[in-house]
């Protein structure tokens, strides 16, 4: 919510600032009154977030790591309260059912013990949940009383023994057991110097050292958030307090474990997504894009809040703004480009199609008398006409205007049309991408220009910022333009597509105009006019971009767009 | 810490040498705590009657917390058994060597499990996609992420 607000607010600030700059220069012209009104409007109505949101912007929230942890803790507390179990038990239950509270409540109410067994909270033989019993039992070596026995029978330690849960401190069987109890030895390391033993509710005891090594390996190597008892076939899962105490002083591993749990929480929740930018810890919550079905009507571009540049799509793996086109079409286009563009270019320049069977043929040497490998059709590489008409002119073709040759070339060009069509869109797409990339260069150039202006005119640094704003806007619009070509490639011919392409053309013209202006030479005398021009054009480009995005987004909501291929989610 | 693995292996070796291996299994070589070799045959009426296989265990310093790398040896003398979970390069797809490994399991326990895996075999055949797997398989089978599909591959 807040971020949406900031987002649209940002745009407003932008134009305000520009206008203000004009005001200072023009000393209060007619337009400044309007601007004043606008400012007043903004001051008076600081909560217009919902109404101000544009169709192409979506509602989302950005969360810090702490906020996510809080949300997770709230879920745990909720379950813990309903079921009357420890938080650590509630956490294991939630992890077991991938944090789906509704399903957990339903299943638990249906059969609490079955869920507890499957979640690794209680052993199969016990019917009731002994969640209130302390999850950790510490044993000293003298109280164990069980010998290690032979190693060869791994099934020896079945968790089937039904003992009543004993409080950690009392061992009624210890005094009454055999007169001289053998010292307990950990069945994993056989280190008889070990004196500290731990077990989960299943009572499978191992020494603290082995537990520590085991948990560390599970957390560090395998990244597990639900770690089972070390005994073979035992399904009891170690609750968090046990993990914490068994890891003893290894705080980094404990922190890693907590992180794994949080990651699982985020990954399980369809309305949450981690910011994909390296080492960024923010999370975005976007419930409107949680369901795949929503992705046919919205393009959920979000920004994580850590930085304005951390822009990514909530609905698909594209780590950039791909508005106005929806995820599935963007994905289709990228795949096509990856597979086809280079190949298509090469095919276009190096091959021709057999005029009979349309097989693509590369001529890699030899004379012009071609014999199609596939259909055995003989033709002339130069005129594409049948070879039979060439008579004895074996190595040259002077028959370019013969009817059969013209027809063959017509057929050729038809089959090339789809390739040409694709390349038309691809080249424009690639162009805008390239230009957007070059904007870094444009930035430094512009910066120089801004310095120049400061020297040659009496404008201050703040006042020459309009150049930078313009560059920003150009880059933004080129991204939009880039994706409009991907969209147009798949749009079904018709009025809607024509309108789309009209908008595209208007935006493109505006962007190119502004781009040119930014590249132009600066004369001292015309700086004020240039400034006026650039500012006007920037505002115009911004408006065109808005129209493009808004209209396309509305079109998706209204179901106005139809495709020339089958697109996921469209009939 | 490396002492856990050697202490544990010393203990296992003592048990093997004093109490003997399970029936049908013989220790061939255990000169160090890195690689052990066993011969294994399946007794009784099975598809592998009369066949002897060679089993290799490789241990890292994390043993027994991490599972040993276990495979059948394929050389001039020995072949890998033809079994739906054994690839022709000797790699074994068995859940107890992967995600169901438990540190309380031991070398003999693994041998016994593999024996029963062979004993219960109904059809002698290679796993699906054997050739493709063998062509690109890593030297150490632990580097392969086997997918244990249901009880089918669980032994």
Image: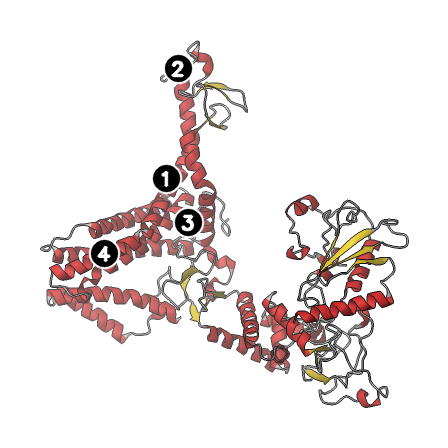
Q: Are marks 4 and 3 in contact (CB under 8 Å)?
A: no
Chosen colour scheme: secondary structure
Nearest to N terminus: mark 2 or mark 4: 2
- In the displayed orientation, state which residue is furthest to the top: A392
What residue did someone put label 4 on? A446
Instruction: Write the residue at 64% across / 51% down.
Output: B138
Measured as percent of width and height from the top left, residue A504 is found at: 32, 48
Instruction: Write the residue at 51% across / 75% down.
Output: A69
Asked if labels 4 and 3 share a chain, the reply is yes
Asked if labels 2 and 4 share a chain, the reply is yes
What residue did someone put label 1 on? A424
- In the displayed orientation, state which residue is furthest to the left: A525
Is residue A538 rendered to the left or right of residue B144?
A: left
Instruction: Write the residue at 15% across / 53% down.
Output: A522
Q: Which secondary structure, mark 1?
A: helix
Q: Are marks 2 and 4 in contact (CB under 8 Å)?
A: no
Q: Which mark is residue A561?
A: 3
Chain assignment, label 4:
A
Q: Which mark is residue A396?
A: 2
Foreground pick, A377 / A294:
A377
Chain assignment, label 1:
A
Between the C-alphas of marks 4 and 3, the distance is: 39 Å
Asked if labels 3 and 1 share a chain, the reply is yes
Between the C-alphas of marks 1 and 2, the distance is: 34 Å
Foreground pick, A502 / B116:
B116
Give the mark toward the camera: 1 or 2.
2
Nearest to N terminus: mark 1 or mark 2: 2
Between the C-alphas of marks 2 and 3, the distance is: 51 Å
Q: Which secondary structure, mark 4?
A: helix
């Amino acid at each position: 919510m807040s971020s949406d607000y900031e987002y649209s607010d940002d745009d407003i600030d932008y134009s305000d600032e520009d206008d203000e700059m004009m005001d200072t220069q023009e000393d209060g012209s007619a337009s400044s009154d309007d601007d004043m009104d606008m400012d007043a409007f903004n001051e008076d109505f600081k909560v217009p977030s919902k109404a101000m949101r544009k169709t192409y912007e979506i509602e989302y929230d950005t969360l810090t790591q702490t906020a996510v942890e809080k949300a997770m803790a709230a879920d745990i507390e909720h379950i813990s309260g309903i079921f009357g179990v420890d938080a650590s038990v509630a956490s294991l239950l939630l992890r077991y059912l991938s944090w789906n509270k509704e399903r957990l409540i339903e299943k638990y109410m249906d059969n609490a013990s079955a869920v507890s067994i499957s979640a690794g909270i209680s052993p199969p033989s016990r019917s009731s949940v002994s969640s209130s019993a302390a999850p950790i039992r510490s044993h000293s070596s003298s109280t164990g009383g069980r010998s290690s026995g032979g190693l060869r029978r791994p099934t020896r330690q079945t968790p089937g023994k039904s003992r009543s849960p004993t409080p950690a401190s009392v061992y009624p069987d210890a005094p009454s057991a055999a007169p001289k109890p053998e010292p307990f030895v950990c069945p994993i390391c056989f280190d008889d110097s070990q004196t500290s033993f731990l077990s989960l509710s299943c009572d499978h005891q191992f020494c603290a050292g082995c537990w520590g090594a085991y948990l560390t390996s599970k957390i560090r190597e395998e990244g597990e958030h639900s770690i089972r008892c070390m005994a073979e076939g035992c399904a009891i899962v170690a609750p968090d307090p046990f993990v914490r105490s068994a890891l003893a002083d290894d705080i980094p591993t404990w922190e890693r474990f907590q992180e794994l749990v949080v990651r699982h929480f985020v990954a399980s929740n369809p309305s949450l997504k981690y910011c994909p930018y390296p080492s960024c810890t923010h999370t975005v919550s976007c419930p409107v894009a949680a369901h795949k079905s929503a992705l046919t009507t919205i393009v959920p571009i979000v920004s994580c809040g850590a930085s304005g540049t951390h822009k990514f799509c909530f609905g698909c793996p594209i780590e950039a703004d791909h508005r106005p086109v929806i995820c599935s079409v963007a994905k289709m286009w990228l795949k096509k480009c990856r597979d086809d563009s280079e190949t298509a270019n090469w095919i276009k320049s190096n091959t021709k199609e057999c005029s009979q069977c349309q097989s693509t043929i590369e001529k890699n040497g030899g004379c012009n008398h071609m014999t199609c490998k596939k259909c055995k059709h003989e033709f002339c590489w130069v005129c594409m006409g049948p070879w039979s008409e060439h008579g004895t002119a074996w190595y040259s073709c002077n028959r370019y205007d013969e009817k059969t040759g013209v027809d063959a070339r017509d057929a050729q060009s038809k089959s090339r049309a789809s390739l040409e069509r694709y390349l038309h869109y691809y080249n424009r797409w690639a162009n805008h991408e390239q230009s957007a990339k070059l904007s870094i260069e444009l930035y430094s150039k512009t910066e120089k220009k801004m310095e120049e202006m400061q020297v040659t005119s009496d404008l201050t640094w703040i006042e020459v910022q309009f150049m930078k704003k313009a560059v920003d806007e150009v880059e933004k619009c080129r991204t939009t333009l880039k994706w409009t070509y991907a969209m147009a490639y798949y749009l079904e011919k018709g009025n809607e597509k024509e309108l789309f392409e009209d908008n595209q053309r208007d935006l493109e013209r505006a962007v190119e105009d502004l781009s040119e202006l930014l590249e132009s030479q600066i004369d001292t005398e015309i700086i004020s006019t240039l400034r006026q021009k650039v500012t006007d054009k920037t505002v115009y480009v911004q408006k065109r971009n808005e129209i493009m995005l808004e209209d396309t987004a509305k079109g998706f909501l209204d179901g106005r767009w139809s495709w020339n291929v089958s697109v996921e989610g469209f009939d | 810490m490396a002492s856990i693995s050697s202490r544990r292996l010393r203990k296992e070796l003592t048990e093997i040498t004093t109490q003997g291996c399970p029936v049908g299994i013989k220790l061939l070589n255990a000169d160090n705590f890195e690689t052990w070799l066993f011969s294994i045959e399946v007794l009784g009426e099975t598809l592998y009657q009369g066949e002897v296989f060679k089993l290799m265990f490789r241990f890292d310093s994390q043993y027994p917390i991490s599972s040993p790398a276990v495979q059948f040896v394929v050389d001039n003398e020995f072949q890998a058994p033809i079994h739906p979970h054994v690839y022709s390069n000797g790699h074994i797809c068995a859940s107890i060597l992967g995600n169901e490994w438990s540190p309380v399991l031991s070398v003999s326990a693994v041998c016994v499990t593999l024996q029963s895996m062979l004993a219960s075999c109904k059809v002698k055949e290679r796993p699906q996609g054997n050739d493709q797997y063998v062509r690109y398989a890593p030297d150490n089978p632990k580097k392969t992420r086997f997918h244990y599909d249901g009880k089918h591959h669980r032994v």
